[in-house]
Every structure is written in structure tokens, then in C-alpha cells.
Amino acid sequence: MADPRNGKSFLFTFYFIITLTLLFISPSYANESPAIVDETEDVVSTDVAASVTEPTREDTLLHKLEELVKNLTEIVSNLDAKLSESKNEISKSDDEAIGGGGAKAFSVTKYSPFWTERFSFTSAMKLDSDATFINVLPFKDFEGSSKYFAIGDSRGRVYVFLRNGDVLIEFFTTVDSPVTAMVSYLSMFKNSSFVVTGHQNGAVLFHRIHEGSSGEDWNSNSVSMEHVGAFDVDDSADPVTLLEVHHVGRVRYILATDLSGKLTVLTENRTVYGSVIPTSRPLVFLKQRLLFLTESGAGSLDLRSMKIRETECEGLNHSLARSYVFDATERSKAYGFTSEGEIIHVLLHGDIMNFK
């Protein structure tokens, strides 16, 4: 779109040139007027009268230039008026946008062909209920990629499916409460893993998934799932929001957090090792370390004493974090968003005794 200020500058320049031309032309015309010299006085008076009554070509040109300057002056005045109106409209639209009068959509990024090197669509599936949680099961193929995925739904069921979207298992967890959290880890037995599900009614259940080859084709596997038991927790507690596995040698602990922020440590024997309530609800645990991010900062857990250390997050400006995810390549980095809708990037350094 053309800028009206460019046209205005051009007209002012042209107007200035015409004015200078008039200033230089007027004296020159007066000086260059032909002298009337004749022998008789009558002839002189007659020529003077003729020069007064009959306009010369220079006078006509001057008159046209004056009209042109007058027209240019009117055009510049109209342009000034339109420019002022456009400025007022722009400022008015800005005020409306700031005040919420009208929201405008805009693009924040563009498609990049390099994305296809990192992300590619593989499959899609649809449940006859609401999907509530998804977990990647710890089974790998010969290329090192994940083979199976588990989805929990609002009816307390778990679906296991392949990358291509084929559903292998539809499993009922023994409670019809929605699955709100899930974690899985490899068992000591070959081709076997455990799945722990947390539910809206506070229940935490223990399941086993076994993979066995079918026929001579080693890549064609049959998967089965069975219920092992329930952890000894209060089923009337708040909904389970977070599950994580912590390894200490061959011993595995299940860390469970509910909506109230209570942190419970469970053993593989399905007993409660201990529980503690931090001042801020844990949102995500750092893998293989008892460090976690909370709504207002970070914390650590000492398994021996079941004591928690907490610290505030610098730069959070008293807003609360709603969700976090740790970077897949650098474990100390995490990304999340706050209650104000802001996307944040945090760094978690140190160990359970000294961290920030």
C-alpha cells in the first residue's frame, strides 16, 4: 500500500519549484519588455495602449502558472485532511484492539520442510469413549522404536495398539473410574513389563503386559495383559494426577501424587512406603532422580527420612505453573505454561540436597 506521506512530499517539492519559477520569471518579464521608440509621439502612445490592452504570451503563461499553483495548494490541503483522518482511524482501531474490541489472528510461524525429518504421521484411532491418558510402553523393535502404546479412557479401560493403529488389547482395569495417570516399566522377566494406572477415585492398580511370538515370524507378536492387584491406598482419596517410577538398584518405587498435592511412595509389593505433603503440588518428576517441579518452584524427596526440600522458581512472578515436560535431550531443561497462559522455560540444577 502506498504511503500518503510520499505523495505529500512530492507535491510540496513541486509547489516549491513552481513558486521559485514565478519569482524568477516575473522580474525577467518586466525587464525584457520591449522599449517603445518611435519618431512621433502619437505612434508611441498608440503602441503603449496596444501593449496595455492586449495581453502578451508571457502574461498568459503567468496566469496559467498561478492557476496551477492554486490547484496544487488545494490538492495539498485535501491530502492533509485525508492523512489526518487516516491517522485518527488507525489510532481508534488500535485502542479498540487494546481494549478487547476486536481480536486479530496472525501467523507466528511458517511451515518448514525440515519438520518432516522429525515428525511424520503414522496412524490414527478413535475410541467409543473419552481418551484420558496415553503412555508409551517400554517395548522396542529391531530399529529401536517403540512398538506399543497404551491409552486409558473414561470408563476405566486400557487399550494397547500398534504404531499402525491396530488395536491389540482392550483391557478392563477392574474399576470403572476414569484413568487419570499411567506409568510403565520393564520387568525382570523377558518380554514382560508392568503398567500402573491411577484413577479419578484415588485407586492405584498394578497390571502386567506380556509379549510372546506367534508362529515362525518373530516380528509377529501376540500381547496379553493381566491384572496383578491394587495398591494399599485410600480409594476415597483425591484423583491421582501423577505417577512415576524410581529405581534404587533392583528395587523400584512408585511415586504417586493426587490432586491435593499429597505425595505417596509405593513399593512393588503394593504397600505404602510413606507419604508427605509438600507446600506446592508436584507436576513432573525428573527421570531417575527424586527431583520434581511444582506449581511454584521445585522440590526434592529424601526416601530415607521422607522429607521434602522446596525452593521457589525465580522469575515466575507469583503465577502458578499448570504443566511441565522435560526436554528429551537435556534433562535439566523443562518447558511448561502458567495459569496466566504464558509459556515458560526453566532449568533445574543440582541434586536432592542442593538444587535450584
Image (cartoon, rainbow, N blue to C red):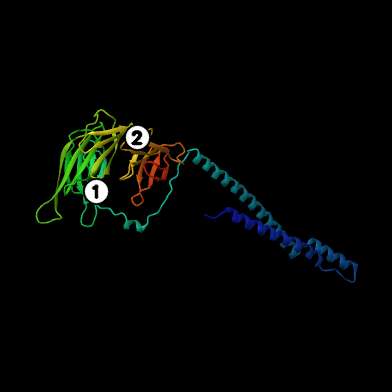
Find the residue positioned furthest to the bottom: 39
Question: In this picture, is 351 found above or below 27?
Answer: above
- Using the image as rendered, state which of residue 304 and residue 176 is in the foreground: 304
Q: Is residue 55 visible?
A: no
Question: In this picture, is 318 found above or below 75?
Answer: above
- Amino acid type at image mark 1: Ala
Q: Residue at x 33, y 41 (%)?
A: 290
In the figure, residue 308 lies in which quadrant? top left
Q: Is residue 20 visible?
A: yes
Q: Which mark is residue 124?
A: 1
Q: Which residue is mark 2?
A: 307
In the figure, residue 291 lies in which quadrant? top left
- Residue 46: % across, % down: 85, 65
Find the residue positioned furthest to the left: 215
- Residue 127: % across, % down: 22, 42
- Label 1 sits on a secondary structure element that is loop
Mark 1 or 2 closer to N-term? 1
- Using the image as rendered, state which of residue 341 and residue 33 is in the foreground: 341
- Residue 235: % across, % down: 24, 29
Q: Residue at x 54, y 55 (%)?
A: 2
